[in-house]
Image: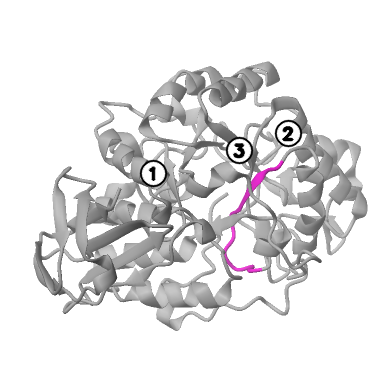
Amino acid sequence: MKYSGIFILFLFLYACQPSTSDVQHTTKSNPSGERPAEPEWARSAVLYECNTRQFSAAGNFAGVQAQLPRLRDMGIDVLWLMPIHPIGVERRKGSLGSAYSVRDYYAVHPDYGTIDDLKNLVGEAHKLGLKVILDWVPNHTSWDAEWMKTHPEYYTRYNGAFTTPINEHGVPITDWSDVCDLDYSKPATRRAMIEAMQFWLKTADIDGFRVDMAGLVPNDFWTEARPALDSVKKVFMVSEWQDEPGHFLSGFNANYGWKWKDVTKDISSGKQNAQSLDTLLNFLDGFYPNDYYQLYFTQNHDENHWAGHEKELYGDAADVFNVLMFTWQGMPMLYNGQEDGLSQRLSFFEKDPVQWKDYAKTAFFQNLCTLKHSNKAVWAGKHGGKLEKIPTDKDNEVYAFTREKEGDRVVIVVNLTKRSQAVTLRTNDKILGAYLSVFGASTVQVTKEMQLNLKPWEYLVLTNK
């Protein structure tokens, strides 16, 4: 679902607090006060978002399954499928409609195949060592959804009538005209949603959910839902929401790094500088519970369609921010086509397949995936090392840091400007020594007062293993 844009771009001026006027939103958390357990495989995972409609010329599950070996070889761990369900016809946008206008939670879109085709896709992914999570849309359905016909009592009434989704301030979102709001004050709605999610765990053996607009659903629902899902199998849950720290205690293992995306785009355009990342990190560490981590990305389906493809948004800085995405402190996510240098804005409401060429960026991302898997320092959250800044004589232009976990260490230096930089790293004793350069396969000696000459947007990624 298209990001609502309620967050301002300049982090320095942003004061993010849960809204006291929110009619659906609560910070009620897990009564135990502990974060939901996550599958062990998530610790070093790389996610890959797949837009089934656009991923192949066929636009179906078979078209995805055919490319699973390629994704596995690149280093992808988790395949995230955009919503798989039939799409509403009433008030549909475009000729094919939005995948986030769900007509039936218990069915798959006939254009994609059958439930058996989905099961085959998941089964083959599992054989190759990949996990599969579904994009889940719990806040609303299409206007002609099955539940609207059989259970109209599940839906929100606003001034006596069914309504488009209600935002976090209690007001209908008028431009989401193709979907109708569900009412989570009704216990029956909650039970029905949990049962629908359990259905896919039991039927297709999926491994978790990326939850669309999770913050528009009451947080105490996730407290209720998570143990019910884990009773089927331990799941991995991602919240597409950044304003609710309670999500980390109720049901989710990670949330969306929308602010990271905004700040990095601003740095690439010169609106902010390298020290903005410190401001961001300090804010995130103070706002969220200990051991949180976020999903970081330079592209997803919303950014790609509504804002622009990677080259439009980041220009020549795209690679350096992808390096940060893999090494900063969270979990990296790629959108289909990035490994091919995707320069299309894929349509949201029409068939518009990726025009695959030569997969030119595969080796770049493969190197980063290998680092993510092999070096515990860059694992997610508490499983990785704490980010420690390396001071430089050009902290506005160059961002340098190290992370260490159980003897594994990385040293990352990135030039976050479009100008060449001669920079001195004020290194401390614990990071001195020989490292392997991830890009270049050469040995680099990190020394006291280390001097570097960096080209525009150049990156140095060093690992001790």
* Crowd around label 2: few <14 · some 14–19 · many ≥20 (10 Å): many
Relative side of 345 to 248, left or right: left
**Magenta span covers which residues?**
234-245
Residue named by callout 2: 201
Q: Residues within 10 Å of mark 3 (few under 14, many from 20)?
A: many
**What number of labels is visible?**
3
The residue tagged 1 is 374
Q: Which numbered circle lies on residue 48?
A: none
* Closer-to-camera residue (432/82): 432
Q: Of the two numbered discs 3 and 1 on the same chain, state the one appearing first in sequence.
A: 3
Main secondary structure of the magenta stretch? loop
Q: Position of residue 275 (x, y in %)?
A: 30, 76
Quarter where residue 273 is shown = bottom left
Secondary structure of the residue carrying tag 2 is helix
Residue 156 image point, x, y percent: 83, 56
- In terms of secondary structure, where does tag 1 sit? helix
Q: Are marks 2 and 1 in contact (CB under 8 Å)?
A: no
Marks 3/1: CA–CA distance? 23 Å
Which colour scheme appears in the figure?
A: one colour
> Which of labels 3 and 1 is toward the front?
1
- What type is the residue that disc 1 sits on? Ser
Q: Is residue 353 visible?
A: no
Residue count near mark 1 (Cα–Cα under 10 Å), binned few <14, some 14–19, many ≥20? some
Tag 3 residue: 133
Which residue corresponds to the image point at 72% horizontal and 48% vertical from the top-left? Answer: 138
